[in-house]
Amino acid sequence: MPTTMQTMIERAPRIAIQSGEGEIGAYELHTGRRTVRAIKARLTRERCGGDRWAHAWVERAAQPGVFDRADLDNDRFTDTRALDLED
């Protein structure tokens, strides 16, 4: 059985929220509840009604520092990158 997005979020060492305006954005570690619903709510707040953009990045448990961008609406990952984030 495939691993669900919720399971990946629960198992992830860290979750980062990337948000910004235009081409400029910043990463911040997510410290809230580890549920798809909670992260979707956070992304909605970060987007400020359409003035900004936001993405969730889920760290791979087996590869510290490697994060996958979560498409929470379609239950899949769409991009991968190495991030150097402060805890």
Image: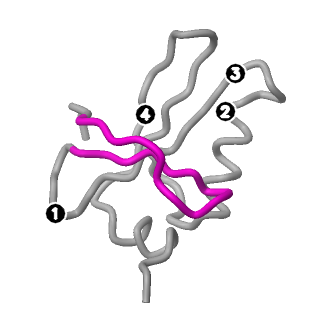
Q: What's the residue type where badge 1 is placed?
A: Ala
Front residue (pair 74, 36): 74
Secondary structure state at the residue bearing disc 3: loop
Distance from the alpha carbon under mark 2 to that under mark 4: 11 Å
Distance from the alpha carbon under mark 3 to that under mark 1: 32 Å
Q: Mark 4: few, some, or many residues within 10 Å (few <14, many ≥20)?
A: some
Distance from the alpha carbon under mark 3 to that under mark 2: 7 Å
The first of marks 3 and 1 along the sequence is 3
Residue at the far right in the pictured view: 49
Q: Give the numbered dot on residue 28.
A: 4
Secondary structure state at the residue bearing disc 4: strand
Q: Give the numbered dot on residue 46.
A: 2
Query: Looking at the picture, does residue 20 appear above or below residue 14?
Result: above
Magenta stretch contains residue 74: yes
The first of marks 3 and 4 along the sequence is 4
Q: Give the numbered dot on residue 62.
A: 1
Q: What's the residue type where badge 3 is placed?
A: Arg
Secondary structure state at the residue bearing disc 1: loop
* Image: magenta residue range: 66-82
Residue 51 x/y as whole percent:
77, 18
Q: Mark 2: few, some, or many residues within 10 Å (few <14, many ≥20)?
A: some
Q: Give the numbered dot on residue 52.
A: 3
The first of marks 1 and 4 along the sequence is 4
CB of mark 1 within 8 Å of CB of mark 4?
A: no
CB of mark 3 within 8 Å of CB of mark 2?
A: yes
